[in-house]
Image (cartoon, coloured by chain):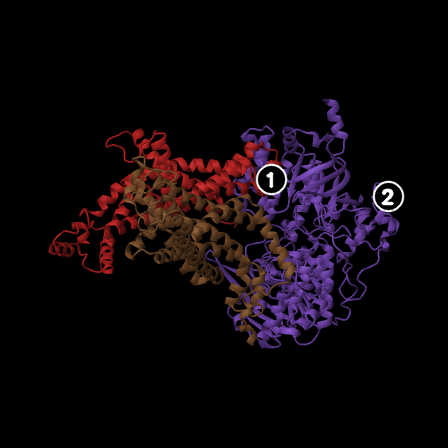
Amino acid sequence: MSLAATAAATAPALELDDLCVAYRVRGAWRQVLRGVSLSIAQGESFGLVGESGCGKSTAAFAVMRYLPRNGRVTSGEIRVGGADLLAMSEADVRRHRARTVSMVYQNPGAALNPSIRVGDQVAEVFEIAGASRAQARERTREMLAKVQIADAGRVMRRYPHQLSGGMQQRVVIAMALASDPTLLILDEPTTGLDATVEAEVLDLVASLRREFETSVLFISHNLAVIRRMCDRVGVLYAGRLVEEGPADEVFRDPRHPYSVGLLRCIPRGGVRKGERPLDTIPGFLPSPGADLRGCVFTERCGLAQEVCRAEEPPLYPVSEGRWSRCHFWPQAHEVPYTAVTPAGAGAARANGEAVLRVENASKTFRQDGHHVRALAEVDLGLRPGETLGLVGESGSGKSTLARVVLGLTAPDEGGRIELDGEPLAPTLAGRGTEDVRAIQIVFQNPDAALNRRFSVRRIVGRALTKLVGLSGERREARMRDLLHAVRFDDRLVGARPSQLSGGLKQRVAIARAFAGDPRVVVCDEPTSALDVSVQAAILNLLVELQAEKGVTYLFISHDLGVVRYLSDRIAVLYLGRLMELGSAETVFAPPHHPYTEALLSAVPTLEGEERPRIRLAGEIPSAAEPPAGCVFHTRCPRKWGEICEREEPPLAEVEPGHLLRCHIPLGELRRLQAAPPAPQSKTTS
Amino acid sequence: MARRILGNTADQRAVDALNEELGTNRNAFVQYADWISGVVTGDLGESYRTRRPVSEMLAGGLENSAKLAGLAFLLVVPLGILGGVAAALKEGRLRDRVLSTGGLSATAIPEFVWAVLVILVFALWLDVLPVTAQAPRGSGLLTQVEYLLLPALCLVFVLFGYISRMARAGTIEALDADYTRTAVLKGLPQRTVIRRHVLRNALLPTIAVVATQTGYLIGGLVAIELIFNYQGVGLLMIRGVQSKDLPLLESAVLVVGVIYVVATLLADVLYSLLNPRIRLGAAQ
Amino acid sequence: MTVTQDPLAITPVAPPRDEARVARREQIRLVLRSKTFIAGAIIVGFWVFCAAFGRAVAPYSPFETDILAKLEPPSAEHWFGTDRTGRDVFSRVLAGARDIMVVSLGATVLGTVLGTAIGLATGYLRGLVDDIVSRVVDAFLAVPVVVLGLLVLVAVTPSKLTVILVIGVVFTPIIARTVRAAVLAERELEYVEAARLRNERAPYIMFGEILPNVLAPVLVEFTVRLGYAIFAIATLSFLGVGIQPPAPDWGVQVFDHYQFLNGGDWWPTVFPAAAIATLVIGVNLVADGLTHALER
């Protein structure tokens, strides 16, 4: 007994030994994990990265022994704290889940039972462990306090739908840690949360991990998040770990062509579109179950040689605790760049009269008897050929602004949209073809944006017919040009969207938007449904098209790295108000608006430099009841004084081309933002 | 109208006189308007045929129909839910196939066809249950149930499929939900997972369906009561049709509509009481 | 801009043959793999055959009475026995398939066409149209189909056409509600906004863009409704307000003879009843097979 206990104490928290998992699809077994081996020491935090479909989540569910019904561990071993998971009986597996391993996954709203009070759901964990009802409730209260939920007693009586996304995820984390597990699995725990909320949740996980001395398996597609949260990292590709090592070393000096490629895809370190294109990883992930001989990455690797096709590379030790599964790991950096044309270099800084003006645009929705002001008196001008980045968290009014510009939603009385100085009708119904084709959009999710019943030819062709009035041979010719411009192979013109990959679908959507030679294209999170390697290719394409056609972009994204790479100017929205507007350099460097400052500090970077984190107190207020005075004052870490609560600051041009909505004078902001902020509670009026 | 009541051999003058008295010499639209103006003042009028107040006839009929429908509901709701949940827990396996296909087939067959089949089997071949539904006057509860069993069974067959299908779909959805995964991964025993986490969410939509089935149930009553010669609201309706007794028919339909609306309303209320999402509204 | 009037624009331009064929073949394969579908199709196929050729292959005329051979039990001569006027039950069962199938199919087609159009319009346009139509739908749904049928068919003379019209109209709001739900989900998808952003008119968006995407639920609803139509029409005929005698309708036959059940003369009732049962089960199995194949 004690022997087993000591063995468990010294054994790694998790060991995967040559783990193979397959799914049965239409009668055939398809391999998803192809021999994954890894080991997580007690108290260690291990990150698993890779693009969608590489098998990350499958690995996590295998460790919970919770594979879908058609999934099976075909070979290999899983040991948790030294115990062989695959040899356990059902009852043991249940105990294993109750005591040893916990899991948190994406979308906390769905993970909580909608019809049971939050407190009861957490208390359940203590009750399985044998606590009485009263004890369980008491410990639930303590646990909720540990995940920094103020007023835990009140929250316990709530139902999940009454909590915000960030709160829900805290509850899920509390539930996961309640059993004091040896291993905590986090599967994309912050994907879908706003940047500032994500930062809070990550901070929380980091501090709880220390407190509970829990080992962590952290799964994410977001390399920067892994970089921030993990000691060691494994890079997964097509069900195979291709590289493993200490997180900072792997991200600083990757030793596998796939890791190299992944890191090059990401806009980082303040690189701008005019400087160089993003690199991409050509080709596609092999489909699950594909017969792969040799190295799994051969098909997409710029370094691949004959030997790569013939021989599976062994684990090449790179340094202490580091290895790579590449025959040519010492030359991994020499993977040739795929994008060589200095795209976007030709995009001269736009100047001159605004092509599109938004004046005093407000939008009020009626919701359950409340007036919700999604957009409040926004003034913006878009210059020809520029990219205006639009950032802000959910509920900030980004999409509403886009819809107003497009004419999908009419602005409130008094708002005005001008195209080339001419006023536009408030809705599409009143706009002529010329006006309609001038402003187009690329939506976030190409699956929803393309009619799944239509072929590419019909989707693009119809736009040409309606917007340009082309038909017959001329339409065909124009369509070929258009598809060529978006690098879409026109042999696929008869395919339906379901037959295309995500990147190809988005190219079709871009082709459609450009069908009528638009003046302005709204890009509404056009790459957030895509993997980073595909994202890079799409961003490059957008830059090229802009250079070629001189189109103006209104680019909406929650990814600040992408916005920074692409935008000439940036507008920051909060609760429907324009808080800051300026060139990308100005907005990204201090002095900037306290909200912008907080937003920037919330985003983890790949460089992993230690930056002071600026915490935002509380939740984003409801747009139905915006705070009086400056709408940001309830969360502002730089609150200036009582004036912030009383008076809404005007949007003032504090320096040429830089507009700010803040009571704090620019000089003072500059001075404050040179030093880390004081905790909000100590700010005096 | 009077011709129908008095028969083909009656004297034409008598017929005219009766038509005059009943008002059935007027066109149908006027008769309808007349009836409606009565209804708004709470008077359902008089039956053309029996000359008794319609409300009196309907009250008796409603009581009988309620007994029959109540028995059917009492049997079918637990059975249907049980069947649906049992099928969902073994989705795609033999038990599910048998229950689902069986339920589907049972539901598809009209009540009067079921009536023919159950009479044939239970009353004639096995001779274990009475053919008529009306228990002798003054019989006890058990005897009444015995008499009502066959007609109720027909309704049970038809309703079983609806309710079990809904319960099955709800259970499968709840089983696939993330929160069920959370519960399993917490290490809860399977029984607890199903009882606390799955069923609570799965059966909510079923409640709504049960109430809307009242409408179908009443539609089914018409044929059942005819074939079993049971003095319920359905039989009154059929008699109303057969003798073109408009006040009776219209009043019966009105009552059925009202019952349906009330049932649906009750279901809505119950549903929102049980569903915290609706009861407590969204997050502030 | 003559292009906007192009009638061809309403029907999808056919994608390259092979692509379309692959997609269609996949769906057909799924349908055909379903055992319930196959079983249902065989049953329905049998009754379709009877509807077409029943009178030709029947051993006797379904109308020929023989007062000397009343209520004869099944025998080699009369497989299903004879009814109370001495007509051959087997021949009447075979011949009875036609009326109910024609009438229920007509009613379902009518209800589906009207219901789909209304569902598309209310789901896409929303607003006042939707509010008004939805209220009417609710009112319709408050009265059971059979009762509603009774009410109307007592006022007008029952005939095949009136039954088709009544059941078709009664089904319209029910189908409209299903289609509306599907349309509401579709109109949230951005391809609808993309269409608005090239100045498409509402009818094109409804029928050209959205309709092709809701065809699967419409087809499923059609087969499910067909089952209900047979159910309802058989019941109405049984109650005397549907298909009228002397047509050899199954419901009518059951009505004419169910009183003889007590006397032990079961055959003129049970055989037509069994015919109804098999037909509705067949249609429902087909519907179930389609649902599973198309809705996943």
Quadrant of the image for the N terminus of chain B?
bottom left
Amino acid type, residue under disc 1 in the picture: Arg
> Is residue B190 left or right of A195 when viewed as pictured?
left
Residue B8, percent from left and from top: 17, 52
Label 2 marks which chain's residue? A
> Is residue A203 left or right of A462 when viewed as pictured?
right
Residue marked by disc 1: B181
Q: Of B141 and B195, which appears nearest the observer? A: B141
Residue A640, percent from left and from top: 63, 58
- The colour with which the image depicts chain B is red
SS at circle 2: strand
Question: Which chain: purple?
Answer: A
Splitting the image into 4 quarters, where does residue A636 fall? bottom right
- Whether labels 1 and 2 belong to a single chain: the reply is no
Residue B215, percent from left and from top: 37, 47
Mark 1 vs mark 2, CA separation in Å: 39 Å
Disc 1: CA contacts within 10 A as few (<14), some (14-19) or many (>=20): some
Residue B94, percent from left and from top: 55, 36
Residue in the picture at 27% in, 33% down: B135
Residue marked by disc 2: A316
Disc 2: CA contacts within 10 A as few (<14), some (14-19) or many (>=20): some
| Residue B130: mark in rendering | none
- Residue B274 visible somewhere in the drawing: no
Q: Residue furthest top?
A: A1
Question: Which chain: brown?
Answer: C
Against A434, residue A179 (above or below) is above
Residue in the picture at 69% in, 60% down: A504
- Residue C115 visible somewhere in the drawing: yes
Q: Of C187 and B186, which appears nearest the observer? A: C187
Against C233, residue C75 (above or below) is above
SS at circle 1: helix
